[in-house]
Amino acid sequence: MKNPQAFEQNLIETIIYIIFLFLGLITVGFVLLITVYLVIAGIPAIREIGILNFLFNTKWASTASEPSFGILPFILTSVYGTAGAIILGVPVGFLTSVYLAKLAPQKIRTIVSGAVSLLAGIPSVVYGLVGMMVLVPSIRKFFHIPDGASLFAAIIVLAIMILPSIINVSITALEAVPREYEDASLALGATPVETYFRVSVPAAKSGIAAAVVLGVGRAIGEAMAVMMVSGNAPNMPELFGSVRFLTTAVASEMSYSSGLQRQALFSIALVLFLFIMLINAALNFFLKRSKE
Amino acid sequence: MKRKIKIALLRALCIVSAAFTCALVLFLLVYILAKGVPNISWELLTTKRSYMTGKIGILPDILNTVYIIVATLIFVLPLGVGAAVYLTEYAKNKRLVAVIEYAAETLSGIPSIIYGLVGMLFFCQFLGMQTSLLAGALTLVIMNLPTVMRTTQESLKTVPQSYREGAFGLGAGKWRVIRTVVLPSCIDGVITGCILSVGRILGESAALLFTAGTAHALNGFFDGLRSSGSTLTVSLYMYVKEEGEFGVGFAIAAILMVLTLLVNLLAMLVGRAFKRRRNYE
């Protein structure tokens, strides 16, 4: 060793590099941890029940003397609930984002953006509480049904909860549209509103698609707010019936579950996780395309 | 003529949608404050729940929320900043960077109920922490890691390359450059990440229900971390859904609403201040 100081310096640099490498890889580690745990915890029940029986049986009776573990009602409820929230939430969110990104004066824009970020920050249990106290009784009165806690109530709450994600991502996409596109359209005699809808929106379509996919992810993953307004009976979905989602199926029985019932709850979480991974892949696809 | 009507209609639809969004926020704010504030009393805020007198106090829940925020930030900040430094300063392999960023995006897309479940399996059962605030905080660390990582990364990207080159030119080693040039300038991102995380932790409930639990005991910080404790959001849920205590529920909702408002305001002010400072430099 000719130069012990340089050696020491190198050693320190190497150690620090290893520490940072470890920290950099920690997100990957966490994703693996979650995946591995869900797979390990979720597989046994699916094996015991049988995958077809588990996914396509329409009856969930986990605590009955002859238990039945079919999660088709939960899957369909989650799919319908999410679709409903998208149908209601996307038009409002999309039009709001066009207004904010293109039409609104600076001052109004600041105020409305503030309102949107507040909407994003409101805890889901607060949405659930308001849904329970305002929405559910109104639905009961308005549609003359015995209980307003239903898929419809959940759809409305979800539609509101996904608004901020849709608005913010769409705004980013619309703002990224090159000015020249709009200028060219304006110069050809199109009015500003026509330009925004005929030129800016098509140019931002990947980003707007990403916004919708993000909304799907948010809606399908929401648990607490939905639990408070959807009635929570494991029925096949009906718009004005009491229903249970994939998320609420896990949450509502976890605290008192045991044995195969508990394992089946983990399997439900695994199914939900697979849905989310698909949605993430789609989101990534659209985001990448919108960057190009 | 037809064209004019169509344009006016589209414009009106945009304005109506934006107005609807605003009205919604205003309604939620006014409704919750109107229903909640009358239910907030000094006694509610400063006592713990007494099963003897049947009176409800939420002091333990407030403290639990503070503890869990502090504990989460203590763990998530070094991890998030470290990951961001690795990505911006060290990582050369593009494919590895893409994998790490994809992992971070995946983490931010996973629903909180799944975090709750895995947190319960891993921290509470596998690592033997039982249902405790610490297990809840560690679960939230995984949830908030992508946020802190992203905000730090963004602030690191604004550090001019010439600063680093200057420091290297003076003979500083990599670690010295990071310590003296890079880290001090990521403080903007760290603060923004902190604020965003606090907002998320404040509103989180599904991930905490099975990891931090639902107890209302009054504890100090370290005892609290070791025992089960309910945060404000979880208490709201339990009081409303399990016990039908809507008054307490609205009081907690009003407190959460005010805190959310404050966090949002702070985020906006801080964001503006940082932007201005950057423009000066």
Image: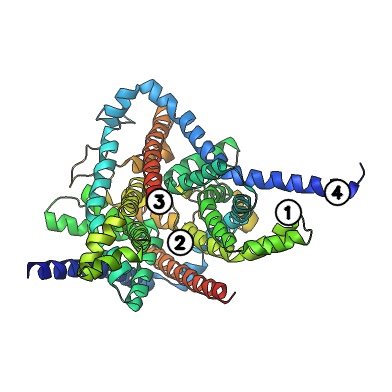
Say if labels 3 and 1 share a chain.
no
Q: Mark 1 lies on which chain?
A: B
State left or right for residue B273 relative to residue A59: right
**Residue that numbered label 1 is attached to:** B174
In space, the residues marked 2 and 1 are separated at their CA atoms by 63 Å
Q: Mark 2 lies on which chain?
A: B
- Marks 3 and 1 in Cβ contact (< 8 Å): no
Q: Reading the chain from its start, which is encountered first: label 3 or label 4?
A: 4
Q: Hey, which residue is sitting farthest left in the picture?
A: B1
Q: Which chain carries label 4?
A: A
**Residue that numbered label 3 is attached to:** A292
Which of the pair A3/A162 is nearer the observer? Answer: A3
Location of residue B256 in the rendering, given as x and y in whole percent from the top left corner = 43, 65
In space, the residues marked 3 and 1 are separated at their CA atoms by 33 Å
Which of the pair B68/B12 is nearer the observer? Answer: B12
Mark 3 surroundings within 10 Å by alpha-carbon count, few (fewer than 14), some (14 through 19), many (20 or more): few
Q: Is mark 4 on a helix, strand or loop?
A: helix
Quadrant location of the C terminus of chain B?
A: bottom right
Q: What residue type is labelled 3?
A: Glu
Q: What residue type is labelled 4?
A: Ala
Location of residue A17 in the rendering, given as x and y in whole percent from the top left corner = 70, 46
Q: Reading the chain from its start, which is encountered first: label 2 or label 1?
A: 2
Decide if residue A133 is in sight here.
Answer: no
In space, the residues marked 2 and 4 are separated at their CA atoms by 71 Å
Q: Which chain carries label 3?
A: A
Quadrant location of the N terminus of chain B?
A: bottom left
**Residue that numbered label 2 is attached to:** B53
- Marks 2 and 4 in Cβ contact (< 8 Å): no
**Residue that numbered label 4 is attached to:** A6
Q: Is mark 3 on a helix, strand or loop?
A: loop
Q: Hey, which residue is sitting farthest right in the picture?
A: A2
Say if labels 3 and 4 share a chain.
yes
